[in-house]
Amino acid sequence: METTIQKNGNQVVALFKGRLDTAAAVTTAEEVKPLMEAANSEIILDCSQLEYISSSGLRIFLSIRKEAAAHGSKVIVRNISADIRQVFMMTGFISLFEIQ
Amino acid sequence: MSKSSKMSIRSKSGFWILLVAAALLESIACIQYFTSRAAIRREACTRARTELRAAELEINVHTAEMEAAAKMLAAMAEYHIEEPEMMYGMTRILLNTLSNVESAGIAFIPDYYPECGHWFEVCSSRAADAPGGIYTRQIGGPEHDYFRAEWFHNGLSIDSAWWCEPYLDDAGAQTMVVSCSYPVHSREGKVVAVVCIDLSLSKLTKVSEYLQVFKDSYYSIRSSTGADLVQRPDTTPGRKYLTFDEEIDATGWHMSIIIPEDILYADLKKLGMLITILMFLGLALLVFIMYRAGMNMQRLITVNTQKERMENELEIAQTIQNAMLPKVFPPFLDCKDLNIYGSVKPAKEIGGDLYDFYIRHEKLFFCIGDVSGKGVPAALIMATTRSLFRTITSHEEEAAAIMRQINDAMSENNEQNMFVTLFLGVLDLNTGVLEYCNAGHNAPVLLPSDRSVKEVEVLPNLPLGVMSGFTFTAQKTKMQPDDVLFLYTDGLTEAENIRHELFGEERMNGVLAAAKGEELGPRNLVMKMQEAVTAYVGEAQQSDDLTMLAVRYQRPAIVMRNDIQQIPTLSEWIEGLDIPKELNMPVNLALEEAVTNVMLYAYPGQRDGKVFVEYAENHNEHEKTLVFTISDCGVPFDPTQAPEADISLSAEERAIGGLGIHLVRQLMDEIRYERVEEKNVLTLVKRIER
């Protein structure tokens, strides 16, 4: 699992690559900390290369969403696969995020 | 073949045996008779000859004595030929001297002594009334004209001792006599007188005692002209005789021993009669024995026929009994989760041991049992037990209930007080949960995948058939993948060698503990145990039925350490399973959530626990079912009790946790939790419609 964070001015893009399972979630949670601090920004979670997500990963997404709300930022989830969309549907996350 | 023709063959052969025996006995009797007859005849000949010789000798002694007396008297007469009066004294002296002489006389030719007259015969004979017992006188005269007597003629003409024919001595002894004459010569050498010595035939009669060889035999002594001297003749006409003759040289007499054959062979005849009687008795005995033997034979044939029929029936019973036991191995080709092997080795044709198993509704029902006793009664109870097992398990799944129903059925009308020890197991093939109930049977041995050997804990329930209405208590355990359950009857542990030492549990456990790799396959394990016990027993006879059953629960499974870093191995394992591609992610996610839950909650504060995940696949015509079983040995933890997450809440309202179990519920069609013998067992089911 690899997470890359890029800042383009007002826009912060996090690119997830690989499987975000419980084991990977531990490091990923550390790696996404910069996103939590971004205030008044547009946080884009790029899932184009995300193969799998478990509840631990979803928790990270939710944390990011909660922090962003606190800091006046907006979170956009982009390019999710069918499988992950299904998980989002099941968990109601589909309504918590703006999905592009 | 009909009974009557059998009988006729038997009586025919009996007849022939009798005929042969009779002929044999008869020929033995004949040989004996003729041999004895010849021997008796030889013996009689020898004896007659011996007796004849003895008689001859005796007669010779007498005749020689008489001849000697005659010669002596003649010599004395010649010496005193001039003195006629001396003749009286001489004859008297002779009679006095020789007691065997009946009378003695000297008869002179006519007118030899002119002074003595024409006739002159001096004679001394024995007479009781005479002085000295001897009567001496001159007896010649016209009334006793001895010149015409044969002895006188021959005495004159034959110049030697001569024996005349027997005659009645009218002058002297007045008895039948035989005389020996001898001539007396004058000084000129002319025969002038004849000495006559009489021998009474009664003397010869004494001799004849020798000739009486048998009590009733006959004999005779005849003179040379055939006159009887002594005789004891036979007068019976038509008799057969055996005659032995002897000639006496000196006197020309003829002796005969005459033995009538009927007397000679009288004893032989008696013996022959006895033998004939004995023979008939023997034949009668033979007939009796043959009759009895025939009866016995008939009985034996009947018994043999019955035995043969029973053996045939036992053989059929053996076939039927064998057919009751599952014997196609591996039995469940479409069930890869299970490997099972059983074997029964009865001590007799049929036995009282049983094992059985079959699968119904993804559950393996199996049992192993041992009926008290052996042989036919045990086999019948065994068949009953097996039928009850099949019947009751067809509608009942709970081990305790199955046991109770079998027990109630068997306790009813159990007049023989037969009982069965039975171990019954119901293995859920989806979860590996084994529910079992033991009715007094040997506790099975579990060989867990970590290769230890442990006896399955069993409660002390009563054997089946002992008490109606007994409440059986079932137990549960979780079989992990590759666990082997080894079941046996006491025929294994109580197998004896020639020194009557038992095979025992220690040896059995030793064999089980030594099994490695391929040897842990149920078939190999049972074979290995059979070899071990056969080698141990050696020449000793198998005393009890020996039954073994090995169940190996083998399913695709993964074992993980209690560490979330192990999670990626789970997805690799799932990829290796043969499940539809589109289900890969949902299954992976559900399992990960469930396993993570276990890791987070079942092992608080420790990292050395283990989590097992097993996979099973079921089919029926409507759907295919994927069953995942997650088990652990941690503290009781039932994730199904977690509250339902409310996914309708806003991000701000939602809690961070609680998503895992929610996902599992969403992804799977069924979630079940069970606490089995210190283990948490969580079963996840996914159905795919066809």
Image: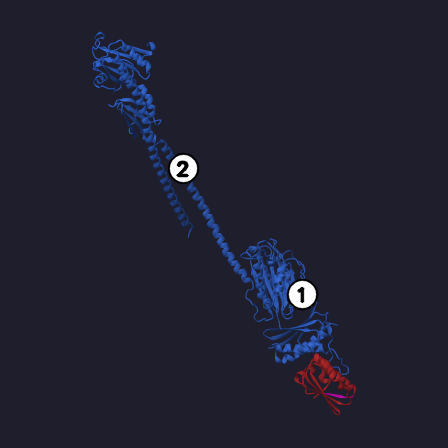
Judge whether residue A74 is colored magenta: yes
Callout 1: chain: B
Q: Is residue B128 above or below residue B621?
A: above
Chain A shade in the render: red
Chain represented in blue: B
Q: Mark 1 is on which residue type?
A: Lys
Q: Which residues are magenta?
A: A72-76
> Is any part of residue B682 visible from this angle?
no
Please report whichever mark, 1 or 2, sits nearer to the chain's N-terminal start: 2
- As measured in the structure, the alpha-carbon distance from the residue carrying label 1 to the one carrying label 2 is 87 Å
Give the percent coordinates (x, y) of residue B380: 56, 57
- Residue B278: give its label: 2
Crowding near the residue tagged with mark 1, few <14, some 14–19, many ≥20 C-alpha atoms within 10 Å: many
Dominant SS in magenta: strand
Where is residue A98, by image quadrant? bottom right
> Is any part of residue B388 visible from this angle?
yes
Total label count? 2
Q: Is residue B566 above or below residue B532?
A: below
Q: What secondary structure is marked by label 1?
A: strand
Give the percent coordinates (x, y) of residue B258: 30, 28
Q: Residue furthest top?
A: B115
Give the percent coordinates (x, y) of residue B565: 70, 77
Crowding near the residue tagged with mark 2, few <14, some 14–19, many ≥20 C-alpha atoms within 10 Å: few
Callout 2: chain: B
Where is residue B680, by image quadrant? bottom right
Q: Nearer the viewer, residue B648 or B423?
A: B423
Query: Looking at the figure, which quarter contains the C terminus of chain B?
Result: bottom right
Give the left or right position of residue B86, taking residue A3 as reference: left
Q: Which residue is mark 1?
A: B476
Judge whether residue B317 is colored magenta: no
Q: Mark 2 is on which residue type?
A: Leu
